[in-house]
Amino acid sequence: MATGGLSGLGTRRRPRRLPFIPIISWLFILAAAGLFALELIRFSQQIDTLSTDVTVAGVNVGGLSGQDAVSRWEQAYAQPITLWYNDSPILLDPAAVGFRTNEQSMLAAARAASEAESSFWSRFFNYLLGGRTERVVSVELSADYQEALLRQFLEDIAARYDRSAGEASFDLQTLSLRAGGQGLLLDIDAAERMVDAALRDPNNRQVVLPVSGTDASRPSIDALRSLIIAYLDSEGFIYDGQTTVASVFIMDLQSGAEVNILGDVAVSAASTAKVPILTNFYRTLTFAPSDDFAFIMAESLLCSNNSSSNYLIEYSAQRDIFAGLANINNMLQYLGIRNTYITAPFDLGDGVVLGSIPAPTSAPNANFNTGADPFNQTTAEDLGTLFSLIYDCAYFGSGLVAAYPEGEFTQNECRQMLNLMSANDLERLLQGGIPADGIISHKNGWLSDVHGDAGIVFPPNGRNYVISVFVWQDGEFFTFERAWPLIEGISRAAWNYFSPEQPLVASRTDLPPQAQDCAVFRPNYGEVNLDNINGWRGGNRGIP
């Protein structure tokens, strides 16, 4: 019993300790849960925020709320565009053309793209870990504007800044023409495309407008016409008067452009009629011209010998001079040269009247009456047209060749006609209005009241042209001292128009008082080389 009692008396209770470790563990767990809940609440509150890797219309809006994202790209696209017209800056406010973004559709697309990246919890844990997804989300621009307003804006710019090329002008002192100044021209269609691209680019808000320089206004052939009329006025010669007429026909053989100043007025043809005579003679030739024929042609065209001219008419119709005259007129009518005819042989100065044939129907300008020779008349336009047909035949195988396709004309025959007339070195009339070394194939003619010359000029630059000029004055004798300088001035104006790089700015001072005698430039018998008309003088100057 005693043992049991002692044993009981010796036992002691241990004191109870608090569970610190579990408590701490739970506290950490609760803290973590609290932080988790706090971050979850924060993340949930930021659910409207876009992913950090989202760009909308080229603007980085990652990590922004929807409202802030819209504000950012709207601000970017509201920036003005600077348009440069050469060195002049012009500001275009996008709002001025009604530019606006489709913000709701773009924001919805950005949100959808963000949410499609991963699940809510994946994005939340990515948020907790501070991670970024490697995939970039880009939403394209959706915007529109009023194209008509942009077009109007650009047209207004063009109206204010474009500059037309200056009009050509002329100088009466030098009888030369001046080109106008260079112009500027906005390409509105191209500019519209460029501005459209800039409106849709948040970064590049600069546009260099497509502006081209227009060529300086080259004098048109109408300017040459105005110069000729002004020149005649300055010389006191009324070109369309009751007692004075200037008839001018000029054709650019490259473009076909024409000057026609009363070119349809009938005038006495005088010796210029020997051009259609020569043309008809070649039409009837069936063999190369002999030395006899070559010399007769030179006498007719270079010396204006009437007897030789009558012989060419006669020989072309088997020695029937009146049939020959009819053949010439029929040829002219067939070629559309309807106001030119010759109905009687040339006067040989012996007073013998050889007779005539009826004149074909013609319809020259009825408003002017120069008292044209009823047996031998032409117009500046008709004679110029005939020269152009010979030229086209010689250089292109067209003209007379095309009009007579049965072989009546060959290119070589047409070249021979032009080459022969290039030896007509009068050094006056049309030839007196071009440089001394200029090449002209021409035929002249004059009477007491009319002076004329027609042909083709071959400038070094290749801008060949036809020129045909007649001046008429009624009443007292119309002297060559008065008439020829007028023709030479018109010729000089034409040369300066077609050869602006080599103008003849003053009247030539080396012209003889009268035309040179044909003995100076007509080859002797046996020396008339129709392919090298000046070969007898040790040169080869002729048509190019």
Image (tube, rainbow, N blue to C red):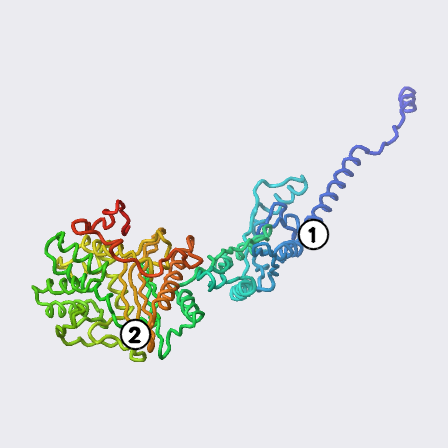
Label 1 crowd bin: few (<14), some (14–19), many (20+), radius 10 Å = few
Q: Quadrant of residue 466?
A: bottom left
Residue located at (36% from left, 66% from top): 481
Q: Amino acid at mark 1?
A: Gln
Residue 197, image x and y in percent? Answer: 53, 54
Residue located at (73% from left, 42% from top): 33
Provide the secondary structure element on which disc 2 rests.
loop
Label 2 crowd bin: few (<14), some (14–19), many (20+), radius 10 Å = many
Q: Amino acid at mark 2?
A: Val
Residue located at (18% from left, 61% from top): 278
Asked if one can make out residue 110 in the rendered structure from this viewpoint, the answer is: no
Provide the secondary structure element on which disc 1 rests.
helix
Which residue lies under the disc numbered 2? 265
Q: Quadrant of the N terminus?
A: top right
Q: Nearer the viewer, mark 2 or mark 1?
A: 2
Which residue lies under the disc numbered 1? 45
